[in-house]
Image: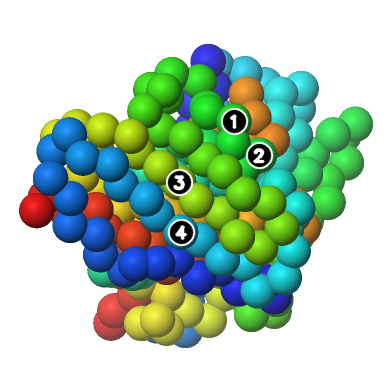
Amino acid sequence: QLQLQESGPRLVKPSETLSLTCTVSGGSISSSSYYWGWMRQPPGKGLEWIGTIYYGGNTGSTYYHPSLKSRVTMSVDTSKNQFSLNLSSVTAADTAVYYCASPDQSDTLDVWGQGTTVTVSS
Amino acid sequence: EIVMTQSPATLSVSPGERATLSCRASQSVSSKLAWYQQKPGQAPRLLIYGASTRATGIPVRFSGSGSGTEFTLTISSLQSEDFAVYYCQQYNNWPAGTFGQGTKVEIK
């Protein structure tokens, strides 16, 4: 059964880059779901889709939320069975719980990591 | 961007009663609609996808209906573990997707 686990710094300074990794277990990132996504949830607020990377046939395609597109980069590391999120030029508005998620037994996000809280503060 | 609007924001229900949650899309999303349950400090849990298909392991008291722009999640008889926040998500333009703002189901 597919499982996901986020990791990365919990505190990031304003204007710097937020970098998170999602480790995939119970399946291979290059032969399982193919779609690997990131979501976030600011304190006390709802969920926001950040972006998704599709990886298949040793190539990847990325899809980003229009409002974040200029600051987001996603990638896959097949050797580590991980995918990652980079969000540049962060501000306090980027403070949130960040989740990685993927489809496994459905056509949408049915496997989620536990989430990691990232605070943007000096 | 497709905007998802959920109502009501808060629903007060007694255990054993029926709960009906609504979700409206700003344009048609066909049947590409999912419902998630989220409890405090936990990740969202997929309940329903394809507007009406229960995800693996989800109890039969959860049911979804609708298509196009109007969707409903029904919990037939609320159990104590069902008090949570529920989000709808459209994924008609997969892999992009937008979530509603959530409905909190609280104990009456």
Task: Respond whether the residues carrying marks 1 and 2 are from the same subunit.
Answer: yes
Q: Residue A5 appears at what percent x and percent y?
A: 43, 36
Q: Amino acid at mark 2?
A: Gly
User: The residue tagged with tag 4: helix, strand or loop?
Assistant: strand
Using the image, name the chain to which the residue with label 4 belongs. Answer: B
Using the image, name the chain to which the residue with label 2 belongs. Answer: B
Judge whether residue A8 can be spotted in this image: no
The residue beneath circle 2 is B50
Q: Are marks 1 and 4 in contact (CB under 8 Å)?
A: no
B19 over B63 or under it: above or below: below
The residue beneath circle 3 is B73
- Whole-angstrom CA distance, mark 1 to mark 2, is 6 Å
Q: Residue at x 59, y 30 (%)?
A: B53
Q: Are marks 2 and 3 in contact (CB under 8 Å)?
A: no
User: The residue tagged with tag 1: helix, strand or loop?
Assistant: strand
Q: In screen coordinates, is B87 left or right of B17? A: right
User: The residue tagged with tag 2: helix, strand or loop?
Assistant: loop
The image quadrant that residue A86 belongs to is bottom right
Q: Which mark is residue B22?
A: 4
Q: Are marks 1 and 2 in contact (CB under 8 Å)?
A: yes
Q: In screen coordinates, is B25 left or right of B55? A: right
- Whole-angstrom CA distance, mark 3 to mark 1, is 11 Å
User: The residue tagged with tag 3: helix, strand or loop?
Assistant: strand
Query: Marks 1 and 4: which is nearer the front?
Result: 4
Using the image, name the chain to which the residue with label 1 belongs. Answer: B
Q: Residue at x 36, y 82 (%)?
A: A92
Judge whether residue A119 can be spotted in this image: yes
Q: Earlier in the sequence, mark 3 or mark 1?
A: 1
Q: In screen coordinates, is B13 left or right of A12? A: left
